[in-house]
Image (cartoon, rainbow, N blue to C red):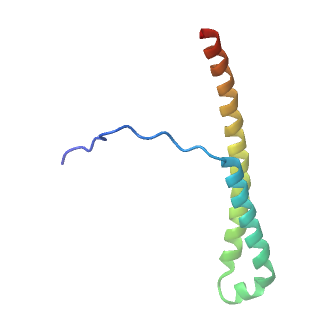
């Protein structure tokens, strides 16, 4: 079996409003948790209690995600400042 080799370079990763996207998703998870909370008894009786805890876990992991992408965004911005300064000196 021959080894597969790419025929072209990989495209650049897409960058967008990452912090806003993660924040929005986290809010959705917490809202889903709060909407399902009044039906706790029904979920427990029908064996679907994991739906409730999945939403809470999604919201909790989303908080970690917000922290992570904010730190990442700040690091990217910090790394970008010296590059533009050094490029201006070369001109």
Quarter containing the C terminus: top right
Q: Position of residue 28 (x, y in %)?
A: 72, 65
Q: How many marks?
A: 0
| Residue farthest to the front, as pictured | 91
Name the residue nearer the viewer: 72 or 50.
Answer: 72
Splitting the image into 4 quarters, where does residue 90 fall? Answer: top right
Q: Residue at x 72, y 42 (%)?
A: 70
Residue 72 percent across, percent down from the top left: 67, 39
Where residue 13 sits: x, y (%)? 52, 42
Residue extending farthest top: 90
In depth, the one of 13 and 51 nearer the eye is 13
Identify the image quadrant of residue 6. Answer: top left
Residue 33 coordinates in the image, percent (x, y) = 75, 72
- Position of residue 20 relative to residue 50, above or below, is above
Residue 3: quadrant of the picture: top left
Q: What residue appears at the point 76 percent right and 66 percent down from the top-left corner? A: 30
Residue 1 versus residue 38 in the image, above or below:
above
Identify whether 15 is placed above or below 51. Answer: above
Instruction: Determine the residue positioned at 18% across, 48% down.
Output: 1
Residue depicted at x 77% and y 82%: 40
């Amino acid at each position: 079996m021959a080894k597969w080799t790419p025929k072209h370079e990989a495209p650049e990763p897409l960058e967008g409003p990452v912090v806003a996207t993660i924040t929005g998703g986290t809010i959705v998870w917490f809202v889903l948790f709060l909407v399902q909370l009044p039906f706790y008894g029904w979920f427990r009786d029908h064996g679907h209690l994991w739906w409730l805890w999945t939403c809470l876990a999604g919201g909790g992991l989303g908080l970690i995600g917000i922290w992570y992408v904010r730190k990442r965004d700040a690091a990217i911005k910090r790394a970008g400042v010296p590059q533009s300064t050094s490029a201006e000196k070369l001109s």
